[in-house]
Image (cartoon, rainbow, N blue to C red):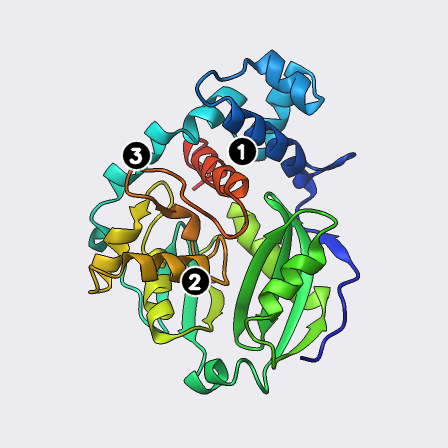
């Protein structure tokens, strides 16, 4: 693998930056506290003290970050809410669009055009492929974005100070590719992906999927889950015509290299439980809560 080690992190959206860092760091600590006390949820005052904010400051931060109060955000990440997402998300085939290998598909109002990388590139694990990458502050922590000349190929998350871990994870998927740090190439993708104001049907985001045939089918099924909905692994297995392959589907969901864009965070356990997320359950809760805020605020 040819590469230069990561050096720079670029802010993506000004509104996500505070004097102490990104809003997500405070949100992350709040979610972790909420998760510990999920049966006896802390008051705003207790939660604010835990994360080092005033109640008013925490209220403003959550409203700025997600468009929700801390209380409303909490309601959006509960098990009962997840079950309602599942109830409203079935059946998967009722999605209002059709996804083709090269055609445009609707992705929670972030419109994309996606295609599969050639089987040769996949089998040779990226040999001959140049991947440009950059780190950007996002609403969900530091985002590692990877692009090829054909479009977005990878999106990973990590916490500040742990950027090399995400890079090692992603680059190990295509170890024979050449990696070049190039924030100027990745910045336009970061701005479009994380700012709903840039989710336009007439300017779809170009995405290239690098995976096995089975993985591609699972990832395409994920693309058919709109914002505000969710789906179980077993339902996804049935959707792709392999109803007994729930475990394999779970593995493919976990291997998704395009986090957030291909919404693997909307795949839930049979009971509605948040059963796993490659970049951490706290981040999965944060993304689902943020999406609830976008919908409730009428942004989308």
Residue 83's disc is 3
Which residue corresponds to mark 2? 112
Tag 2, which secondary structure?
strand
- Structural distance between the alpha carbons of marks 1 and 3: 21 Å
Give the mark, 2 or 3, whose residue is nearer the N terminus.
Answer: 3
Please tell me how crowded label 1 is: few (under 14), some (14-19), or many (20+) other residues with Cα within 10 Å: many
Give the mark, 1 or 3, whose residue is nearer the N terminus.
Answer: 1
In the displayed structure image, the side of residue 121 where residue 190 appears, left or right: right
Which residue corresponds to mark 1? 66
Please tell me how crowded label 3 is: few (under 14), some (14-19), or many (20+) other residues with Cα within 10 Å: many
Single out the mark in the foreground, 2 or 3.
3
- Structural distance between the alpha carbons of marks 2 and 1: 23 Å
Residue depicted at 53% across the width and 39% down the height: 282
Question: Residue 102 location in percent, x, y?
Answer: 37, 74
- Structural distance between the alpha carbons of marks 2 and 3: 28 Å
Does residue 181 appear in the picture of this structure? yes
Does residue 188 appear in the picture of this structure? no
Tag 1, which secondary structure?
helix
Quarter of the image with the C terminus is: top left
Question: Residue 30 location in percent, x, y?
Answer: 59, 28
Give the mark, 2 or 1, whose residue is nearer the N terminus.
Answer: 1
Tag 3, which secondary structure?
helix
Single out the mark in the foreground, 1 or 3.
3
Residue 13's disc is none
Looking at this view, is 86 or 165 the one in front? 165
Question: Residue 247 location in percent, x, y?
Answer: 32, 57
Please tell me how crowded label 2 is: few (under 14), some (14-19), or many (20+) other residues with Cα within 10 Å: many
Residue depicted at 47% across the width and 73% down the height: 210
Q: Quadrant of residue 78?
A: top left
């Amino acid at each position: 693998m040819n590469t230069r080690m990561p050096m720079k992190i670029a802010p993506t959206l000004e509104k996500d930056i505070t004097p102490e860092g990104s809003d997500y760091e405070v949100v992350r600590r709040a979610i972790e506290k909420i998760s510990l006390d999920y049966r006896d949820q802390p008051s705003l005052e207790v939660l604010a003290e835990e994360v080092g904010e005033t109640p008013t400051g925490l209220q403003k931060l959550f409203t700025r970050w997600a468009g929700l109060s801390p209380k409303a955000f909490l309601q959006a990440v509960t098990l009962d809410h997840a079950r309602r997402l599942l109830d409203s998300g079935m059946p998967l085939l009722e999605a209002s669009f059709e996804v083709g290998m090269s055609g445009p598909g609707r992705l929670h109002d972030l419109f994309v055009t996606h295609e599969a990388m050639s089987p040769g590139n996949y089998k040779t694990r990226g040999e001959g492929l140049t991947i440009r990458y950059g780190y950007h502050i996002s609403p969900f922590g530091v985002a590692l974005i990877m692009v090829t000349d054909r479009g977005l190929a990878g999106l990973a998350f990590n916490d500040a100070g742990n950027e090399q871990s995400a890079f090692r994870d992603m680059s190990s998927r295509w170890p024979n590719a050449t990696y070049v740090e190039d924030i100027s190439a990745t910045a336009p993708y970061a701005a479009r992906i994380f700012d709903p104001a840039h989710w336009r049907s007439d300017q779809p985001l170009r995405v290239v999927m690098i995976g096995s045939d089975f993985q591609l089918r699972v990832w395409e099924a994920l693309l058919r889950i709109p914002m505000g909905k969710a789906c179980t692994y077993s339902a996804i297995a049935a959707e792709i015509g392999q109803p007994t392959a729930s475990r394999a589907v779970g593995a493919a969901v976990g291997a998704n290299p395009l986090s957030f864009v291909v919404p693997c965070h909307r795949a839930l356990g049979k009971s509605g439980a948040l059963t796993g997320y490659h970049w951490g359950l706290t981040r999965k809760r944060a993304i689902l809560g943020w999406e609830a805020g976008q919908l409730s605020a009428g942004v989308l």
